[in-house]
Amino acid sequence: MNRTLSTTLATGVLVALLAGCGPAALPVHAEVEWEGQNAGEFEDDPRVQVVREYVVQVYAADNAFNYSDPALTEIATNATVLSLARSTASSIRQSPVDSASMWEGPPSFTVTNIVKRERLEHTFDVHVCQRVAPRWTLAIGDTFDEGKIQERDGAYRIEQEHFVKHQYSVSDALGSWRVSGGGVSTEECEPTDDFAVGTYTTPPDIDLLHEATPDMVRGPGGRRVDD
């Protein structure tokens, strides 16, 4: 009993020390104000519900460079969360050729189908028709979907004009659904049902794009990912 307790405490201290290196982790603000309502035949499916929660949490994590919040890590695979954090750190490191993105809200989408993966018994692709919320970046070349661009103090606001096809991979892990990434195309689509548009009640701090350093990014467990 004592040996187990000592090991647990030592592990907790080590994680705290690792997380404490560099700037403190920024808080994640994932509260959303919604306009409209999502509709469609798949909305009550738990695989769709976990995807909807995932996009809220992951885009809020982008705004804070912080992918350690349990609200995200409990519904996404560890590999997915770590990949997201590493991608953000890499983008910051390459700024302004590349740049991290900050979002005014989560994406809006309608669900078009749920398809089982071949040879993977408990994995499904949730197909959606999606448009991301307006985002801020330092990289003028980041013109995904040729959206409308506005400039403010060296940062660029890009508004995606069209919906495009996207998919999210969802797997059953010990009785609960987890998102394990997805894929996006440039093929345009039209929403087939009503959809909600969300805005984070705490807007992204655009000044952080200018101040960002890779060691500000936190991955699972609050660890730095820039080493």
Image: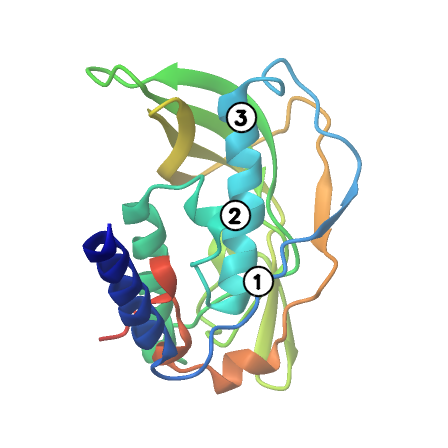
Specify which label sits upstream in the sequence, 2 or 3.
3
Amino acid type of the residue that numbered disc 2 sits on in the rendered structure: Ala
**Among the 4 quarters of the image, the one containing residue 92:** bottom left
From the viewer's perspective, is 116 left or right of 35? left
Tell me if mark 2 has few (under 14), some (14-19) or many (20+) residues whose alpha carbon lies within 10 angstroms of its own: some
Amino acid type of the residue that numbered disc 1 sits on in the rendered structure: Val
* Residue 52, image x, y percentages: 57, 36
Specify which label sits upstream in the sequence, 3 or 1.
1
Specify which label sits upstream in the sequence, 1 or 2.
1
Task: Calculate the distance from the C-alpha at mark 2 to the C-alpha at mark 3.
Answer: 16 Å
Whether pointer 3 and pointer 1 mark residues with C-beta atoms closer than 8 Å, the reply is no
* Residue 216, image x, y percentages: 41, 77
Task: Calculate the distance from the C-alpha at mark 3 to the C-alpha at mark 1.
Answer: 23 Å
Instruction: Residue under label 2, please give it.
Output: 71
Instruction: Residue under label 1, please give it.
Output: 28
- Can residue 219 be seen here? The reply is no
Whether pointer 1 and pointer 2 mark residues with C-beta atoms closer than 8 Å, the reply is yes
